[in-house]
Image: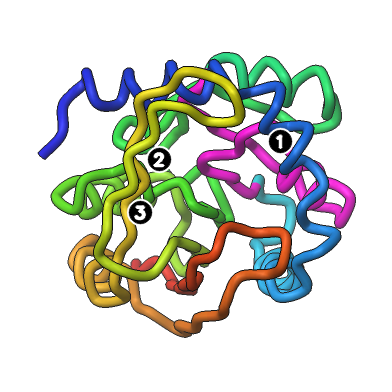
Amino acid sequence: MSNARDHDRVRRSYDAVAEEYRRRIGGELADKPLDRALLAALVEQNEPGAPLADLGCGPGHVAAWLAERGVRPVGVDVSPEMVALARRAHPGAEFREGDLLDLPAEDGEFGAAVALYSVIHLHPAELRPAFAEMHRVLRPSALLLLAFHLGTEVRHLTEWWGHEVDVDFRFFEDDTVIEPLRAAGFAVEARMERTHYPQEAETRRGYVLARRLP
């Protein structure tokens, strides 16, 4: 299992690329029809009036998209620079600094949650405790949407868009994600995969939609 040093490497790496990340990724949903459809399904099934968590929110573009559709998003990210960017760019949403293993939220605070490519920085042994935290902050029967890169490799970057970084991107097979998800108290309702869009890194993408059990 990883330790605080590993999470600090992720934090410092995303701090370093935050502005460039926002510039390159901040408008990505315009070119991702499947992602928009899945997010729309999450919005439709979110408990009325309940906040919806965007876990690993980056510069806040997904939270902003959710806010435009009438929900109250709360973005959470490990990178202080990302959170600062998100707050400046999207004042209509709430953003908090926090780790997936220790979410800054009350028990049962959220009516749904999305975690797009945020678990990819966790060690496999950290998935179950991360999902247990998601279970804690979700209301009974709330939905969780996950997205991740499919495979078994680990890509380590020391340079990213001209910035010095030290970060691992972990690819997971479906069952590597689904087994700890079920063990943490979720029932899987849908799973799917797609190839990359032209503007994306050339990886296959996995999606899992799961419901928190009471």
Q: Which residue is depicted at the point 82% across and 47% down?
A: 27
Q: Work out whether 154 lies above or below 186.
A: above
Residue range of the region highlighted in magenta in the rendering: 52-79
- Specify few, some or many for label 2: CA neighbours under 10 Å numbering under 14, 14-19, or 20 or more: some
Give the residue pinned by disc 1: 60
Q: Is residue 76 magenta?
A: yes
Image point 25% across, 71% down: which residue? Answer: 182
Q: Is residue 185 visible?
A: no
Badge 3 element: helix
Image height of 94 relative to 135, above or below: above
Estimate the spatial distance between the alpha carbons at disc 3 and disc 1, rounded to whole Å.
22 Å
The residue carrying pointer 1 sits among few (fewer than 14), some (14 to 19) or many (20 or more) residues within 10 Å by Cα, namely many
Do the residues bearing badges 2 and 1 touch, measured as CB atoms within 8 Å? no
Q: Are marks 3 and 2 in contact (CB under 8 Å)?
A: no
Q: Regarding mark 1 in the picture, which secondary structure is present there?
A: loop
Q: Residue at x 56, y 55 (%)?
A: 114
Name the disc covering residue 25, or none.
none
Q: Earlier in the sequence, mark 3 or mark 1?
A: 1
The amino acid at mark 3 is His
The residue labelled by disc 2 is 107
Indicate yes or no whether the magenta region holds residue 87. no
- Rendering quarter of residue 69: bottom right
Viewer can see residue 203: yes
**Residue density around tag 3, few if under 14, some if 14–19, many if 20 or more, within 10 Å:** many
> Observer-nearest residue: 97 or 117?
117
The residue beneath circle 3 is 135
Q: CA distance from mark 2 to mark 1?
A: 23 Å
**Residue 1 at x, y percent in the picture:** 10, 39
Rendered view: 54 above or below 131: above
